[in-house]
Amino acid sequence: MSAFSHVILTSAGAAWLAGLTASATAAQTVTEPVVVTATRTAQTADATLASVQVITREQIEQAQASDVAQLLRFQAGLDISRNGGPGQTTSLFMRGTDSNQTLVLIDGVKVNPGTIGGAAWQNINPAVIERIEIVRGPRSTLYGSDAIGGVVQIFTRRGRVPFSHSASLGLGSDATFSGTVGIGGKSERFRAGLDLAVETTDGIEPRTDSNAPGDFNNYSVNLYAGRQFGGIDVDFVTWWTQGNTDYADFFGAPLDQDFQNSVSALTFDTAPLENLTSTFKLSYTIDKVQQTQDDDIARTRRWVADWQNNLQFGNSQLLSGGLSLTRENDYSVSLGSRFDEDRNVKAAFVQDDIQYGRHKLLLAARYTDDDFTRDKSTWSIAYGYHLLPGTRVFASAATAFRSPDSTDLFGFGGNPELRPEQSRNYEAGLKQQFSGAHSLQITAFQNKIKDLIAIDFATFPSEAENIDRARIRGIEAQYQFQRGNWYATLEGILQDPEDRETGQQLARRAKKTLTGSINYAHGPYSFTGKLLTTGRRPNSDFDETELDGYTLVDLMISRRLNRSLSAHLRIDNLFDEHYTLAEGYNTEDRAFFVTLSYSSAPAMEGSGL
């Protein structure tokens, strides 16, 4: 066992044993957030039978990140790869799975494109985000395709008080400019708000072998409104972002592309019976990237109607079920190939959440009818036991899948006969809340994935086939401390992401990662430090290049000037570490950013904001 293994396992075990007796008798003071992503129903994070994390609005403001990937990279087990600086193509690998095997939701709506690749992380501005829920492990039974490695759900801003308004102005390295304006509020029956955000930067030269510029601009809007009409609550939200990115092509030539991403959703919530709630959501999503030098384009338009019902039986059982209908159009012109395809997906799911004394059982099943590929049935089962006050053990098994996207089926090298990628995951874990201010979670997992889609170069012409297999084993630990003006987290993961065909480590996925953060607030000041250290990993399945491990430290300092006005300093890559996320692409050196922010809402006590 490596020294890294001893650090994680020994520290976690010692912390648990040290607080076990005290936790059985003392009151818990760690506040657990309420999450909905793990089960599609509201429950506290410690009660879920899964590995769950929440990034709150206060933490987002403390981090001062310029995009959502910068927030997520300090979560162990979420490997980030980026082809250059801000705005460049960004990928996330959760728990060793591929970048297109993590489902991304915005306000409950899927934003993974139907054309190719994962969600456009680089385009999501944290200025319009209220919170982020991260659920590790498969969730296809609840959400369908893509949720093999886990789910990241992003919730956009909502008003917290009857009326508030805010604004910010920021400047930084590489001629970076950012600005935000927001207004919103709520009453007993009505709520509404609008947030606007802009970011522009000269960025950095994306490639190491080219002086092509990396300019990036992003304009984001978040608009919401809701009202209660008798027993029905109606909610409308639209998130929209668009802009332009300069980049370099395979040969280093300068190019640029326009992008647009948007989610609009109309939701109706009602309780027709005392123990029955019903939610109907109609949503529309656009994911579009268009090169300005020629006709190359990738565009997804998706309509979804989703209906969910929750039936509560006393305090011991919650039965949930739902239906969804999806109509998607995928259009692409790339590498001399073109397709314009309509896709229809119908699905039904059921979940039974049973609580009996110290025992908790979660059963779920889903049937998916996709007119492009074979129908899929998935299932999941989880069991938890409240061993002691503050101590819960759990185990689960689940299947998941990823349907081939339209490029896999109809693009260059596409194959209309492809089957969905399939996985089976097992995990077991411990959640411990100590007396006072400590909490700990340890999870061991194994995920076997088959029918992975890859280009078969043994055939001519080469085309995509279901020919690869992978096995990912690992253990992850998450520790949290919160007391007075101090808040700290420490996370680590040890994993073995293995290509079962070659025996090699999967590309861009590290075997070990350690992250940490610490925040201290005193009077008008707030100090936040973040640490990320990760191991070596292969660059690609098509070369033998290995990317070195690296360590990054970011520092954020805030000062509240008065009740409404605050000043912030952010230093990225404090020690000017030279590192590589993708071979042939540059990463940012040390960078500085200053922001002046105004908010009419009172600052959170002890937050330093």
Image (cartoon, rainbow, N blue to C red):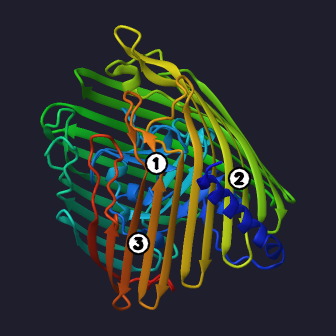
Q: Position of residue 284 (x, y in %)?
A: 39, 44
> Mark 3 = which residue?
61
State the residue position of label 1: 79
What mark, if any, has residue 238 been given in the picture? none
| 71, 184: nearer the viewer | 71
**Mark sitting earlier along the chain (1/2):** 2
- Give the answer, above or below, for where 605 lies relative to 363: below
In the rendered image, residue 37, in percent from the top left (x then y), is placed at 58, 53
Q: What separation in Å lies between label 3 and label 2 (alpha carbons)?
A: 29 Å
Residue type at mark 2? Leu
Compare residues 304 and 544 and report the one nearer the observer. Answer: 544
**What residue would you read off at disc 2?**
49
Residue in the picture at 75% in, 47% down: 395
Check disc 2 and report its element: helix, strand or loop: loop
- Amino acid on which disc 1 is placed: Asp
Confirm whether residue 419 shows in the render: no
The reply to whether discs 3 and 2 touch (Cβ–Cβ < 8 Å) is no
Residue 321 rendering spot, x and y as whole percentages: 66, 43
Frontmost of labels 3 and 1 is 1
Badge 1 vs badge 2, beta-carbon distance below 8 Å: no
